[in-house]
Image (cartoon, rainbow, N blue to C red):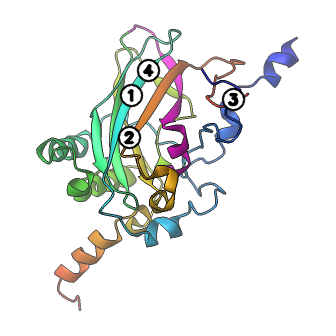
Amino acid sequence: MSTAMNFSSKSFKPRPPDKGAFPLDHFGECSAFKERFMQCLRDSGYESSACRQRAMAYLECRMERQLMANEPLEKLGFKDLIDEKSEAKPEKL
Amino acid sequence: MVGMSYAAVPLYRLYCQATGMGGTTGAGHGSEQIESMEPVRDRVIRVTFNADVHSSIQWNFKPQQSEIYVVPGETALAFYKAKNPTDKPIVGISTYNVIPFEAGQYFNKIQCFCFEEQWLNPQEEVDMPVFFYIDPEFVEDPKMAKVDLITLSYTFFEAKEGQKLPLPGYQ
Protein backbone atom coordinates (compact mmCIF):
# COMPACT_ATOMS: atom_id res chain seq x y z
CA MET A 1 0.00 0.00 0.00
CA SER A 2 2.72 2.46 0.85
CA THR A 3 5.31 3.14 -1.80
CA ALA A 4 8.81 4.31 -1.28
CA MET A 5 8.03 7.62 -2.96
CA ASN A 6 6.96 9.57 0.06
CA PHE A 7 10.34 10.81 1.13
CA SER A 8 9.09 14.10 2.39
CA SER A 9 5.88 13.10 4.08
CA LYS A 10 5.79 11.24 7.32
CA SER A 11 4.36 7.78 7.31
CA PHE A 12 1.77 7.12 9.94
CA LYS A 13 3.10 5.75 13.17
CA PRO A 14 0.44 4.57 15.55
CA ARG A 15 1.07 5.85 19.03
CA PRO A 16 -0.05 4.16 22.20
CA PRO A 17 -2.89 5.86 24.04
CA ASP A 18 -1.71 8.35 26.65
CA LYS A 19 -3.29 6.50 29.51
CA GLY A 20 -3.17 3.00 28.16
CA ALA A 21 -6.04 0.70 27.48
CA PHE A 22 -9.45 0.71 29.07
CA PRO A 23 -10.14 -2.56 30.85
CA LEU A 24 -13.14 -4.23 29.26
CA ASP A 25 -16.45 -3.66 30.96
CA HIS A 26 -17.24 -7.37 30.96
CA PHE A 27 -20.33 -7.00 33.12
CA GLY A 28 -21.74 -3.97 31.35
CA GLU A 29 -21.59 -1.96 34.55
CA CYS A 30 -21.46 1.27 32.64
CA SER A 31 -23.68 0.29 29.73
CA ALA A 32 -26.51 2.50 30.91
CA PHE A 33 -24.20 5.51 30.88
CA LYS A 34 -22.99 4.55 27.46
CA GLU A 35 -26.57 4.28 26.23
CA ARG A 36 -27.43 7.72 27.55
CA PHE A 37 -24.38 9.12 25.83
CA MET A 38 -25.22 7.41 22.54
CA GLN A 39 -28.79 8.66 22.74
CA CYS A 40 -27.48 12.19 23.16
CA LEU A 41 -25.28 11.74 20.09
CA ARG A 42 -28.23 10.54 18.04
CA ASP A 43 -30.40 13.40 19.24
CA SER A 44 -27.76 16.02 18.54
CA GLY A 45 -26.77 14.89 15.08
CA TYR A 46 -23.58 13.33 16.42
CA GLU A 47 -22.19 16.54 17.82
CA SER A 48 -19.58 15.69 20.41
CA SER A 49 -19.70 19.09 22.13
CA ALA A 50 -23.38 18.64 22.91
CA CYS A 51 -22.81 15.41 24.80
CA ARG A 52 -19.84 16.14 26.99
CA GLN A 53 -21.84 16.00 30.20
CA ARG A 54 -22.85 12.44 29.43
CA ALA A 55 -19.37 11.54 28.24
CA MET A 56 -18.08 12.74 31.57
CA ALA A 57 -20.73 10.72 33.40
CA TYR A 58 -19.65 7.60 31.52
CA LEU A 59 -16.01 8.09 32.46
CA GLU A 60 -16.98 8.78 36.07
CA CYS A 61 -18.89 5.50 36.06
CA ARG A 62 -15.77 3.71 34.92
CA MET A 63 -13.61 5.34 37.54
CA GLU A 64 -16.05 4.46 40.30
CA ARG A 65 -15.93 0.82 39.27
CA GLN A 66 -12.20 0.51 38.79
CA LEU A 67 -12.64 0.35 35.04
CA MET A 68 -10.45 3.35 34.57
CA ALA A 69 -7.61 4.92 36.52
CA ASN A 70 -8.90 7.71 38.72
CA GLU A 71 -8.15 11.06 37.24
CA PRO A 72 -9.40 14.53 38.11
CA LEU A 73 -11.99 15.41 35.51
CA GLU A 74 -10.21 18.66 34.73
CA LYS A 75 -7.33 16.62 33.40
CA LEU A 76 -9.71 14.84 31.05
CA GLY A 77 -10.80 18.08 29.45
CA PHE A 78 -13.94 18.67 31.53
CA LYS A 79 -12.74 21.66 33.50
CA ASP A 80 -15.50 23.93 32.22
CA LEU A 81 -18.20 21.45 33.21
CA ILE A 82 -16.73 21.09 36.68
CA ASP A 83 -16.52 24.84 37.12
CA GLU A 84 -20.16 25.17 36.11
CA LYS A 85 -21.14 22.52 38.61
CA SER A 86 -19.32 24.13 41.50
CA GLU A 87 -20.71 27.56 40.67
CA ALA A 88 -24.21 26.17 40.79
CA LYS A 89 -23.71 24.67 44.22
CA PRO A 90 -24.17 26.92 47.22
CA GLU A 91 -21.17 27.38 49.51
CA LYS A 92 -20.78 24.51 51.92
CA LEU A 93 -20.30 25.29 55.58
CA MET B 1 14.42 -21.39 16.58
CA VAL B 2 12.26 -20.87 19.65
CA GLY B 3 14.41 -17.88 20.49
CA MET B 4 13.53 -16.37 17.14
CA SER B 5 9.83 -16.47 17.75
CA TYR B 6 10.27 -14.84 21.14
CA ALA B 7 12.48 -12.22 19.59
CA ALA B 8 9.61 -11.50 17.27
CA VAL B 9 7.43 -10.88 20.32
CA PRO B 10 4.72 -8.84 18.84
CA LEU B 11 5.84 -5.34 18.07
CA TYR B 12 2.80 -4.03 19.82
CA ARG B 13 4.45 -4.80 23.13
CA LEU B 14 6.79 -1.96 22.42
CA TYR B 15 3.73 0.22 22.43
CA CYS B 16 2.17 -1.22 25.54
CA GLN B 17 4.23 0.69 28.01
CA ALA B 18 1.51 2.96 29.24
CA THR B 19 -0.68 0.84 31.45
CA GLY B 20 -3.15 3.47 32.48
CA MET B 21 -1.14 4.88 35.31
CA GLY B 22 0.84 7.73 34.06
CA GLY B 23 0.86 8.27 30.39
CA THR B 24 3.51 8.52 27.79
CA THR B 25 6.51 10.62 27.21
CA GLY B 26 5.01 12.18 24.12
CA ALA B 27 5.78 15.85 24.06
CA GLY B 28 2.83 18.02 24.83
CA HIS B 29 0.38 15.19 25.24
CA GLY B 30 0.23 15.31 28.97
CA SER B 31 -2.64 16.14 31.26
CA GLU B 32 -1.47 19.74 31.44
CA GLN B 33 -2.16 20.22 27.79
CA ILE B 34 -5.57 18.62 28.07
CA GLU B 35 -6.46 20.73 31.07
CA SER B 36 -5.39 24.00 29.50
CA MET B 37 -6.30 23.56 25.85
CA GLU B 38 -9.13 25.58 24.40
CA PRO B 39 -11.58 24.28 21.84
CA VAL B 40 -11.26 25.80 18.38
CA ARG B 41 -14.94 26.12 17.60
CA ASP B 42 -14.63 27.36 14.04
CA ARG B 43 -12.94 24.19 12.83
CA VAL B 44 -15.49 21.43 13.02
CA ILE B 45 -14.07 18.10 11.98
CA ARG B 46 -16.03 15.08 11.00
CA VAL B 47 -14.46 11.95 12.44
CA THR B 48 -15.66 8.72 10.89
CA PHE B 49 -15.09 5.27 12.28
CA ASN B 50 -14.03 2.13 10.57
CA ALA B 51 -13.72 -1.35 12.02
CA ASP B 52 -11.96 -4.29 10.50
CA VAL B 53 -11.14 -7.75 11.64
CA HIS B 54 -8.34 -9.76 10.27
CA SER B 55 -9.41 -13.10 8.84
CA SER B 56 -7.65 -14.79 11.76
CA ILE B 57 -10.18 -13.58 14.30
CA GLN B 58 -13.83 -14.49 14.47
CA TRP B 59 -15.05 -11.50 16.45
CA ASN B 60 -17.81 -9.28 15.25
CA PHE B 61 -16.42 -5.80 15.63
CA LYS B 62 -18.01 -2.53 14.62
CA PRO B 63 -18.28 1.13 15.56
CA GLN B 64 -21.37 2.21 17.48
CA GLN B 65 -21.51 5.50 15.59
CA SER B 66 -20.50 5.99 12.02
CA GLU B 67 -19.34 9.55 12.63
CA ILE B 68 -18.97 12.26 15.23
CA TYR B 69 -18.37 15.96 14.83
CA VAL B 70 -15.60 17.33 17.02
CA VAL B 71 -13.50 20.44 17.32
CA PRO B 72 -9.77 20.53 18.02
CA GLY B 73 -8.94 21.13 21.65
CA GLU B 74 -11.95 19.35 23.10
CA THR B 75 -11.96 15.78 24.34
CA ALA B 76 -14.41 13.40 22.73
CA LEU B 77 -15.76 9.95 23.41
CA ALA B 78 -16.80 7.30 20.92
CA PHE B 79 -17.60 3.61 21.06
CA TYR B 80 -16.95 0.42 19.24
CA LYS B 81 -18.51 -2.89 20.10
CA ALA B 82 -17.09 -6.38 19.89
CA LYS B 83 -18.76 -9.73 20.16
CA ASN B 84 -17.33 -13.21 20.28
CA PRO B 85 -19.99 -15.33 18.55
CA THR B 86 -18.06 -18.56 18.92
CA ASP B 87 -18.10 -21.16 21.66
CA LYS B 88 -14.56 -20.61 22.82
CA PRO B 89 -12.74 -17.63 24.33
CA ILE B 90 -10.80 -15.51 21.92
CA VAL B 91 -8.08 -13.02 22.72
CA GLY B 92 -7.81 -10.14 20.34
CA ILE B 93 -5.47 -7.26 19.93
CA SER B 94 -5.98 -4.23 17.82
CA THR B 95 -4.06 -1.58 16.06
CA TYR B 96 -5.36 1.55 14.47
CA ASN B 97 -4.83 3.83 11.56
CA VAL B 98 -5.69 7.48 10.96
CA ILE B 99 -6.47 8.85 7.54
CA PRO B 100 -5.22 11.18 6.23
CA PHE B 101 -1.87 9.99 7.49
CA GLU B 102 -0.62 13.49 8.10
CA ALA B 103 -3.51 14.17 10.47
CA GLY B 104 -2.42 11.24 12.64
CA GLN B 105 0.14 13.31 14.50
CA TYR B 106 -2.69 15.53 15.80
CA PHE B 107 -4.98 12.69 16.75
CA ASN B 108 -4.37 11.96 20.41
CA LYS B 109 -5.94 8.98 22.07
CA ILE B 110 -6.16 9.53 25.77
CA GLN B 111 -7.44 6.06 26.35
CA CYS B 112 -8.77 3.28 24.18
CA PHE B 113 -8.67 -0.45 23.80
CA CYS B 114 -5.82 -0.86 21.41
CA PHE B 115 -2.41 -2.43 21.65
CA GLU B 116 -3.31 -4.60 24.61
CA GLU B 117 -4.81 -8.04 24.55
CA GLN B 118 -8.53 -8.18 25.07
CA TRP B 119 -10.18 -11.39 26.15
CA LEU B 120 -13.75 -12.16 25.19
CA ASN B 121 -15.58 -15.21 26.48
CA PRO B 122 -17.89 -17.24 24.24
CA GLN B 123 -20.94 -15.19 23.25
CA GLU B 124 -19.66 -12.18 25.15
CA GLU B 125 -20.25 -8.70 23.82
CA VAL B 126 -18.57 -5.57 25.14
CA ASP B 127 -18.44 -1.86 24.56
CA MET B 128 -15.05 -0.53 23.58
CA PRO B 129 -14.57 3.17 24.19
CA VAL B 130 -12.12 5.52 22.57
CA PHE B 131 -11.43 8.78 24.37
CA PHE B 132 -9.50 11.21 22.24
CA TYR B 133 -8.92 14.77 21.11
CA ILE B 134 -7.52 16.56 18.13
CA ASP B 135 -4.57 18.70 19.09
CA PRO B 136 -5.36 22.43 18.70
CA GLU B 137 -2.08 22.79 16.82
CA PHE B 138 -3.90 21.09 13.99
CA VAL B 139 -5.38 24.44 13.02
CA GLU B 140 -1.93 26.04 12.79
CA ASP B 141 -0.73 23.57 10.22
CA PRO B 142 -1.23 24.87 6.68
CA LYS B 143 -1.20 21.32 5.38
CA MET B 144 -4.30 20.63 7.44
CA ALA B 145 -6.21 23.67 6.19
CA LYS B 146 -8.42 21.65 3.88
CA VAL B 147 -8.80 18.65 6.17
CA ASP B 148 -12.28 18.42 7.60
CA LEU B 149 -12.63 14.66 7.63
CA ILE B 150 -10.53 12.26 9.65
CA THR B 151 -11.13 8.54 9.64
CA LEU B 152 -10.16 6.39 12.56
CA SER B 153 -9.80 2.77 11.64
CA TYR B 154 -9.24 -0.11 14.05
CA THR B 155 -8.33 -3.63 13.07
CA PHE B 156 -8.50 -6.59 15.40
CA PHE B 157 -6.25 -9.59 15.15
CA GLU B 158 -6.24 -12.76 17.13
CA ALA B 159 -3.47 -12.49 19.70
CA LYS B 160 -1.02 -15.32 19.39
CA GLU B 161 2.33 -15.81 21.05
CA GLY B 162 5.15 -14.87 18.75
CA GLN B 163 2.86 -13.37 16.19
CA LYS B 164 4.14 -10.24 14.54
CA LEU B 165 1.47 -7.60 14.45
CA PRO B 166 1.45 -5.80 11.12
CA LEU B 167 1.57 -2.25 12.33
CA PRO B 168 0.94 0.28 9.61
CA GLY B 169 3.90 2.43 8.81
CA TYR B 170 6.35 0.10 10.49
CA GLN B 171 9.09 -1.39 8.35
Amino acid carrying label 4: it is Asp
Label 2 and label 3: CA atoms lie apart by 36 Å
Mark 4 Cα shell of 10 Å, populated few (<14), some (14-19), many (≥20): some
Q: Is residue B29 above or below residue B10?
A: below
Amino acid carrying label 1: it is Asn
Select label 2 or label 4 by which is in front: 4
Amino acid carrying label 3: it is Met
Q: Relative to the observer, which residue lies in front, B72 or A30?
A: B72
Residue of label 4: B52
Chain hosting mark 3: A
Q: Is residue A63 above or below residue B112?
A: below
Mark 3: secondary structure: loop
Mark 4: secondary structure: strand
Label 2 and label 4: CA atoms lie apart by 16 Å
Residue of label 2: B129
Label 1 and label 2: CA atoms lie apart by 14 Å
Report if residue B97 lies within the magenta region. yes
Q: Which residues are magenta?
A: B86-109
